[in-house]
Amino acid sequence: MPDQSKWWQSGVIYQVYPRSFQDSDGDGIGDLLGILARLDYLAELGIDAIWISPIYPSPMADFGYDVADYQGIHPSFGTLDDFDRLVAAAHARSIRIVLDFVPNHSSNQHPWFTESRSGRDAPRRDWYVWRDAAADGGPPNNWISEFGGSAWSWDEATGQYYYHAYLPEQPDLNWRNPQIAAAMLDALRFWFERGVDGFRVDAIHHLFEDESLQDNPPNPEWLPTMSPARSLIRTRTMDQPEVHDAIMAMRRVADSFPGDRVMIGEAYLPITRLMAYYGVDLGGFQLPFNFHLMSTAWNAQAVSTLVETYEAALPAGGWPNWVLGNHDRSRVASRLGPAQARIAAMLLLTLRGTPTLYQGDEIGMTDVPIAPERVRDPWEKRVPGLGLGRDPVRTPMQWDEGTHAGFSSAEPWLPLPPSFEGFTVSSQLRQPDSMLQLYRKLLRLRRAEPTLSVGGYRAVSADENVLVFERFHQQRKLRIALNFDDHAKTLPDADATGHILLSSYLDTPSATSSVELRPSEGVITELD
Ligand code: GLC
Ligand code: MG
C-alpha cells in the first residue's frame, strides 16, 4: 500500500440520484440547491465524495442519461451558478464532487443528432452510427437494445438505420470518428475547469460495436422471464478492444488537471474482463466499478470466494472497489432483508477498496412498489411486468415524517412508500441502534483507522454462515467476523483475543472478544 493514499482510495463515495435527493423549489423534483441544503447531513454521515447522476439538459427519456448538452445544467436541477455554489460548498466541507459522464450516446434532441440526421451528406452524419437496411429492408443485424426491441431505428427521411444500445431516444455516438472523441473530451475539460473532482463514466462497455456488424449469437440460457437483451450473448456489441484507447484518452484529460481527479467506469463485466479497464500501465480507470457483491449469492462462502478471486485478479497497482447498490439495481435491504443489510453495510465498509453507497441505503430503504399509472422508467414501459423497471429504487429520499417525507413541498415525481415509519433520517438519528447509526459508526471507524481504509486484507475462514477476515496496517490488526445466518454461531478462531470495537447490534461491547456471534451479527475486533 502506498504511504500517501489518494482521497479516492481512502475515501467513501456516496451516490446522489438528484431527482430524488432533495427538492428545493417545490416542483417535486430534486435539484442542486436541494443537494446543497443537505451537505451537512452528508458531512456528518462521514462520506468523502458524492457522485451525482446526470444533471445536464435532457428531454429525460432516460431521466438524464439522454444528454442534450454536455456543458449545461437542466433547468429543473438549477443553473451553472447553482452548480458552482454546490461545488464550493461541498469543497468547504471536504466533500468531493464526481459527475456522471455519458459518452456512449447522446439524446436524439442533441443538436449533433439533429444535424446528423438532416441528410446523408450532413457534416456530422458520421458522428452517429448509421447503416443501410438489410436486403429485406429490416435492421442491419439482430442486435437488441438493452431496453428491449431492435437496437436499430429507421430514419425515414434519410433512408438509413441508426444504432442505439439503449432507447431510440439515445442514439450511440460514433467513437470511431476522432471529432467525437475531441468534442467529448472537451466536455470533460469544461467540468474539470469548474472544479469537478472526477467522473463516473456511464455504460463504458458499450462504447464500441464490432464494425463488421455480425450478429450476436443466441444465449442458450435465456428464459422469456429475462430481459430481451439477454437473449443474445453480446460478443459483438460489448467490451470491444477499441474501448481501452478511448478510456486512456479520458484519463489523460483527468491527469492534465491539478489535484487527484478520478475516473470511475461503469462496466458490468466478469472479473477477468473487468481488470483490463484499469488500462495498460494503469492508464485507464482508477476505479472500474466492481458490481459483483450485488450479484453473488449471499452466503459467507460465496462472498469469501468473490473477495479472494477479485483480490487475486487485480493488476499490480490496481486499487479495489466495492458497490452495494445503485439507481439501477434492487435495493440491498430488499435483496437481503433488514438484518442482513446490516451485515452488508459492515462488509462494504471493512473490505479493502473504495466503497460506494447509494442514497437511502444508509436508512435501509427498500424497493417501493409502483402502481402502473405511476411508472416512469422507459425500461418498464417497453418491457412491462418482468420486474426490470428501476422506479422502485429511485423514489424520494425519506428525510422526516413531514409532508412528502421532507423531500418536497409538492407531490414527488415518484411516490413514497405507503408507510415508512422508522425509515427516515430524522427517526433514525433519534434511535441509537438504527441502520443510520450503524453507517455513521462504521464510516467514523473507517476514517479513524487506516487499517480499514488502506490496510491489507487477509482471509481467515469462511463456511456457509460465518465469514472471518483480517485487515492489517503496520502493527495493527483488526478482525471482522460476519454472521450471514439468523442463528447464533460460534467463531472458528476462538483463541484470537482482543477488544470489540463495534458490533452491528450497536450495544455496549464487552471488554474482550466473544466467541459467539448473535443472529446476523457482525463484529469488528481489535486483536492483541
Ligand atoms: C447506465 C445507467 C443507467 C442508464 C444507462 C443508459 O447503465 O446507470 O441508469 O439507463 O446507462 O445510459
Ligand atoms: Mg426542484
Image: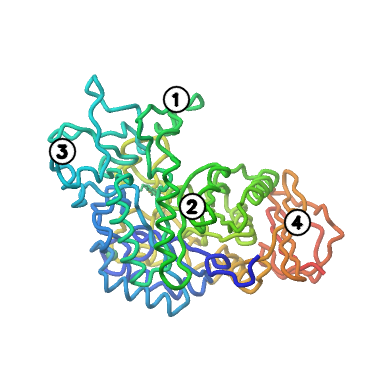
Spatial CA distance of label 3 from label 1 is 33 Å
Q: Which sits earlier in the primary sequence, circle 3 or circle 1? A: 3
Q: Which residue is mark 1?
A: 218
Q: Which sits earlier in the primary sequence, circle 1 or circle 2? A: 1
Q: Which residue is mark 2?
A: 366
The amino acid on which the numbered mark 4 sits, given as a three-letter code, is: Leu
Per the rendering, the mark at residue 321 is: none
Residue 461: x and y in percent read 77, 50
Residue lying farthest to the bottom in this orientation: 92
Q: Which sits earlier in the primary sequence, circle 1 or circle 4? A: 1
Quadrant containing the C terminus in the rendered view: bottom right
Q: Which sits earlier in the primary sequence, circle 2 or circle 3? A: 3
The amino acid on which the numbered mark 3 sits, given as a three-letter code, is: Arg
The amino acid on which the numbered mark 2 sits, given as a three-letter code, is: Thr
Residue 358: x and y in percent read 48, 58
Q: Which residue is mark 3?
A: 120
Residue 223: x and y in percent read 47, 27
Q: Which sits earlier in the primary sequence, circle 4 or circle 2? A: 2
Circle 4 residues within 10 Å: few <14, some 14–19, many ≥20: many
Spatial CA distance of label 1 from label 2 is 35 Å
The amino acid on which the numbered mark 1 sits, given as a three-letter code, is: Pro
Give residue 89's quadrant in the image: bottom left
Q: Which sits earlier in the primary sequence, circle 3 or circle 4? A: 3
Per the rendering, the mark at residue 517 is: 4
Contact (Cβ within 8 Å) of mark 3 with mark 1: no
On the rendered structure, is 521 left or right of 253? Answer: right
Residue 190: x and y in percent read 31, 66
Spatial CA distance of label 2 from label 3 is 49 Å
